[in-house]
Every structure is written in structure tokens, then in C-alpha cells.
Image (cartoon, rainbow, N blue to C red):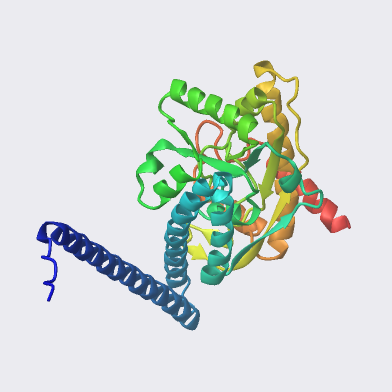
Amino acid sequence: MSTPPARNHTETRPKEREGKAKKRRKETMNILLSSLLVLGGLILTTVLLLLLLSHLLQNPALEFYARALASFTALILCATYGTLASACLNLAGYGGLGQWTTARAFKYCMLLFTGIWFEIDDPNDWLGKTRPAVFVGNHQSEMDVAFLGHMFPKYCSVTAKRSLRLVPFLGWFMSLSKTVFIERSSREQAVAAFAKAAEQMHSHKQSVYIFPEGTRSYSDHPDMLPFKKGAFHLAVQAQVPIVPVVVANYSNVLNVKRKVFRSGTIPVKVLEPIETKGKTKEDVDALLELTRSRMLEELGKLTVLARKEGVSLKEDEARTRSSDTAAPANGGVGKASGVDARYNAAAASAGAS
């Protein structure tokens, strides 16, 4: 009768340890995922209850904070999704779609959580067929992130200040989705970042979206801050079109100073591209002025419509609010741009028709 072969403990012990380690990792991941799902569910439930409570009580301040919390929750959820989606898309060779797919997810999350919707008027499909391009838009508040969710074209990335790379989830997503990070305190680093962006625009047909005002205006009437030149230098350097995108003033939907945050549909207009082929750095100032002039004119027209729909503060409310606040120095939000004359002309035209 044959005896069974002796068990080789030196071979089985490492395998057993490896099997136990895999089991522990799997259990840890299950616990982590379960915790995240529970936490996400609790946050979502809290947000929805706050929104319901704010409607029942008809309390504007409570509604403001409820919608602000809802927006932040949507941003974190979509940034987490964007991090995972961008990693997968990069592996599949479609990294340029990372910000587009995340933007679309945020679009519907914001509609669900806050009731905010942006109505894009782009009859010539400039967003779809102009590539690569430098897209520029007016920057009113934090809610412009939701606007990007509606209009953001495929194979496009945003610019952001370099410090955002360190923000959990949001920074990870931005890094994976080809965001152009700018060091605002260093002109040399900013120029280098734009030079790299211009190279990528040609090699990957990648567009860039920039807020040329550089910061949020929080304006309660149709106006914009002075433009910075970076977007126009980039367009000239890359020899690509500038596509202006104008969002109506929505100061009666979101107004941080007045603690107002309501649902609403906000009109947006995509303007005809401005060509830069053959232009040089000497033409940057003229391109900036032309772009800003066209955007201000359209902003006045859109705000006429927005005021009719209750999206923007009425003229007398905006004027009262403006008189309560001193005008910013260095040509900030005020009446130096001449936008009030454009607005009055647009209003008169709308009234005549």
C-alpha cells in the first residue's frame, strides 16, 4: 500500500498567506464601498429633505443653504465619478473625453438636486463643429460650473489655478482629465502652460475653455469684469478660432449677497467664431476688445429675456443693489463698460417688437 506524498509546508504557507491577504483586501474594499454608499445615501437624503423643508416653509435663506449644499454634494459625487471615468478613458485612449462625460453627469445631477437648467442657443452648432478652439465665457458665480455641464463640447478642457490640483476628488479629476493648470503668481509659468496647451491643441485637436475675466463678477446687472489677455494670446499662438459663449445675468436665481438660490431656466447664446489665422501678438488687444464688445452686446439682449422670465433682477432692483455697493476699483463691475447703453437699446428694441 502506497503512502501519500509528504506535504510541502514551504510551498503551501506562502499560498495560504497570499490567499488570506487577498481575502482581507476584498473584505476591506467591500467595507469601504459599503461605507461610501451609505455616506452618499445619507448626504443625498439630507439634501433632499432640506430642499423639501425649504419649500414647505417658504424660507428663502433655508432654501439658499439647502440648494448650496445640494450643489456641493452634486459636485463631489461628479468629481468622484469623473476621477474614475477619466482614469478608464485614459487607459482606453479617450482621455480627451474625461471632462465632457463628467460635465454631462453634473448637468443632470444639478437638474435633479437644484432644478437649474441652462438653455443653449447654438443654431449653427459652433460648439460641435469648431475644433480645436478657444471657448470664452462670462463668469458670474460658482454656478457657472453647472453651465459648463450643459455646453461643454467634446475634446475640450478647462483652465484652473494650480492650487486646485491639491483638492481631493476635484483635483484628482482635473489632473486626469487634461486640465490646463495656471500658476497665476508667475507669468513665466503661465506662459509655459499656455505654450504647452497650444501644442496639445494641435497634436490632439483639443479645445480649451477659459473665463477671460479671471474671477467671478457676482454682478446683479448685465456687465462683465475687464478681460485678461491669456485666452487671446493662446488663440493667436495656436492659430485657432475664439468662440464666445454668453450666459444671461441670473442674479435672481443665484445671488450670494442676498442669499437667494432658486430653480430656473437660464438662456445661453453661442456666438460666431472669431478667426485668428494670420494674427500675431500685436493683434491681441484688438481681438480682446472685439470679443468683449460682442459679448456685452449679447449679454444685454439675453438679460432682457432673462428679466421677463424672472431669472435676472429687474432693472430697478439691480440699480438699487448697485447703489448700495461701492463700485470696484480698476474698472470692475460697474457702468464704465457701456453695457447699460447696450442693455437699454436692446430693451427698447424688444419693446418695439
Left or right placement of residue 197 versus residue 161 in this view? right
Residue 100 pos. (x, y %):
59, 51
In this view of the protein, which residue sits in the foreground, 63 or 18?
Answer: 18
Left or right placement of residue 184 versus residue 228 in this view? left
In this view of the protein, which residue sits in the foreground, 4 or 248?
Answer: 4
Residue 218 pos. (x, y %):
53, 49
**Farthest residue, direction front:** 1
**Farthest residue, direction bottom:** 56
Mark yes or no: residue 219 visible: no
Residue 264 pos. (x, y %):
62, 67
Left or right placement of residue 18 versus residue 173 in this view? left
Quarter assignment of residue 164: top left
Task: Kindly identify the residue that appears in the image at 73 percent across and 26 percent down.
Answer: 276
Total count of labels: 0
Mark yes or no: residue 336 visible: yes
Quarter assignment of residue 137: top right
In the displayed structure, 319 sits above or below 156; it is: below
Task: Kindly identify the residue that appears in the image at 46 percent across and 45 percent down.
Answer: 176
**Farthest residue, direction right:** 353
Task: Kindly identify the residue that appears in the image at 30 percent across and 65 percent down.
Answer: 29
In the displayed structure, 112 sits above or below 123; it is: below
Residue 66 pos. (x, y %):
43, 70
| Image quarter (top left, top right, bottom left or bottom right) of the C terminus | bottom right
| Image quarter (top left, top right, bottom left or bottom right) of the N terminus | bottom left
Quarter assignment of residue 224: top right
